[in-house]
Amino acid sequence: MTQITNAAVAVQVAKSLEDEIVSGGWKAGHFIGRRQELATRFGVAPATLGEAIQLLRSRGVVDAKPGPGGGIFVASRSPFMQLSDQLLQLREGKATASDCLRVLDALDGLVLHDAIEHAGDDDIAEITALADRLQAVWDTDKGPSAIWALHARIALITPNELLRSLYTNLVDYIIAEQLEGATAPSTPERLRTHLDFAAAVAGRDHALARSAAERHRHSSVATLLS
């Protein structure tokens, strides 16, 4: 007879186990426990515990070894998985506006370069429309969201999945957390810089992109120091 598991409980057990691993600073190979012991400790059916373990195995958090001396162990984590975990912990760590803007400013040049090289007609049309909207709402409370929408849409063009994911997730984090100090004053110069981002992509103009990225970086630094 197939045992029915409670998916929500399995997710909660998986989270609790992962929290233990992180808070305990357990290294690769650390013995977590045997399946039956863990099922008893969490008060769940063996099948539910198995589902929780499978969730953690799929993410590379634990290894399951059968037989005598077996059980559930902390898995070896690749550097890429460690990076992924650290990014997922941004919300708990509360990265500051300064942290996020410094990283985004460092990536703007790469994002613009790839957008210029790989933008299709549909990309250019959407970016141009976002630039027009930005200009229309610049001095309103919709200005900040229009800025980030333009940044994120340009970043979506890059074929570099790591660059695209890092950039767009940082933008999403800034928006979701409404980080104080994440948006510079609405000056005409800053508007011109963002319109030049769009113009550089539309005109496939690397020189304009470099100039705009440099101006954007200087305005961000000035904001953070003010």
Image (cartoon, rainbow, N blue to C red):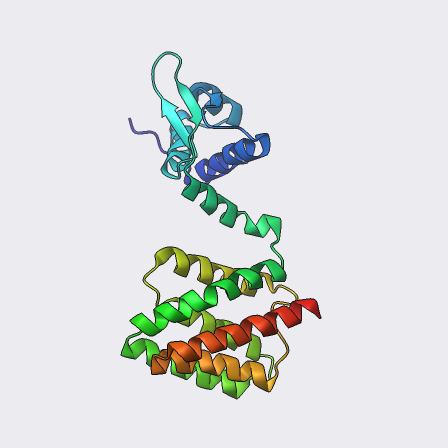
- The C terminus sits in image quarter: bottom right
Q: How far across and down, in percent of the image, does residue 161 sit?
A: 35, 57
Q: How far across and down, in percent of the image, does residue 66 sit?
A: 34, 19
Q: Residue furthest front?
A: 207
Asked if residue 22 is positioned above or below residue 199 in the image, the reply reads: above
Q: Residue furthest right?
A: 226
Asked if residue 173 is positioned above or below residue 201 in the image, the reply reads: above
Q: Is residue 165 visible?
A: yes
Q: Residue furthest top?
A: 68
- 109, 154: nearer the viewer: 109
Q: Is residue 115 left or right of residue 92?
A: left
- 5, 199: nearer the viewer: 199
Residue 178 figure quarter? bottom right
Write the residue at 56% across / 79% down: 143
- 116, 37: nearer the viewer: 116
Q: Is residue 221 left or right of residue 59?
A: right
Q: Is residue 23 left or right of residue 129?
A: right
- The N terminus sits in image quarter: top left
Q: How many marks?
A: 0
Asked if residue 81 is positioned above or below residue 216 in the image, the reply reads: above
Residue 139 figure quarter? bottom right
Q: Is residue 142 visible?
A: no
Residue 157 figure quarter? bottom left
Q: How far across and down, in percent of the image, does residue 71 sit?
A: 41, 20
Q: How far across and down, in percent of the image, does residue 213 sit?
A: 49, 73
Q: Is residue 36 left or right of residue 98?
A: left
Write the residue at 43% across / 76% down: 209
